[in-house]
Image (cartoon, rainbow, N blue to C red):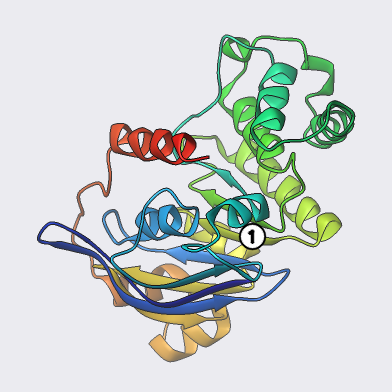
Amino acid sequence: MIDVKHLSKRFNETLAVNDITFSVEPGELFALLGPNGAGKSTTIKMLTTLLKPTSGELSLDGHDVLKEPHLARKSFGIVFQDPSLDTDLSAFENMQLHAVMYGLTLKQSVKNSEELLKLVGLWERKDSLVKTFSGGMKRRLEIARGLLHHPRVLFLDEPTLGLDTQTRNLLWQYVDKMAKEKAMTILFTTHYLEEAENNATRIAVIDHGELLKIGSLKEILKDTDSKNLEQAYLKLTGKAIRDEEVSPHETWRAIRRARSMR
């Protein structure tokens, strides 16, 4: 479902992603882990057409991301690390706006919006302005919006960042339910390692743009002689504190560029 071959991305003198290769099978919950600046978000931006790679090949649901970007975009939904909702619109209006961008008919849009807002427990608040929502409600709405066009692949970039433990657990219940009911492939990043331990079918660890390890939790623990994922992660990436990878302003500039190309 996702196929990455010898992918690299260079920003001037910085090699953010360095010749990585991996694939994600249909129906997998695949965790891409790494410290700040490791190359996680840059990889997702290339997969979702927000950035062009310096070199390499990318395929989503059988579509070449570089040669068929429009078809690739129809194949995936995404929840960005940074908030991307229009807080001056209602939950339902945010869903409708997204539907227009993906070319859904009015009938499809209304049907899918109702189905998904009910699924994430927001149907009763469909007419409320998003500015009145809690952080957890906004995240649930972003996930519902990302699924509106019934994508084959869902990208979750730090979907539970800043949420309390109860809301994080609830969100993962929704994600797991949607993955099973919609038979979706999900690639996610997170700094909460227990989320990868509890939810991922396979895990990849990236650092300094290089793919260090990939496999099931059991395989990674065995290969690193570790008792848990945190121990394995620190053995692979070290204990040094890292800088942030990309600023929110750079993220939004990339999003606007991608939207202008549609």
- At a point 55% along the width and 60% down the height, the residue shown is 68
| Side (left or right) of 70 relative to 126 | left
The correct choice, above or below, for 90 with respect to 68 in the image is above
**x, y percentage for residue 250?**
29, 37
Q: Is residue 84 above or below residue 188?
A: above
- Point out the image quarter for the N terminus: bottom right
Which of the two residues, 93 or 170, is positioned nearer the viewer here?
A: 93
Work out whether 19 lies above or below 158. Answer: below
Label 1 crowd bin: few (<14), some (14–19), many (20+), radius 10 Å: many
Q: Residue at x 32, y 61 (%)?
A: 39
Q: Residue 85: horizontal and vertical position, in percent? A: 55, 24
Numbered disc 1: secondary structure: strand
Residue 239 shown left or right of residue 174 in the figure: left
Q: Position of residue 50 (x, y in %)?
A: 42, 48
Asked whether 79 or 218 is in front, the reply is 79
Q: Quadrant of residue 25?
A: bottom right
Residue 147, quarter of the rendered image: top right
Q: Residue at x 82, y 31 (%)?
A: 105
Q: Nearer the viewer, residue 62 or 92?
A: 62
Residue labelled with disc 1: 186
Asked if residue 240 is positioned above or below residue 139 in the image, the reply reads: below
Q: How many labels were placed on the picture?
A: 1
Residue at 61%, 26% in the rendered image: 138
Q: Position of residue 116 (x, y in %)?
A: 81, 36
The residue type indicated by label 1 comes to: Ile
Q: Residue furthest left?
A: 13
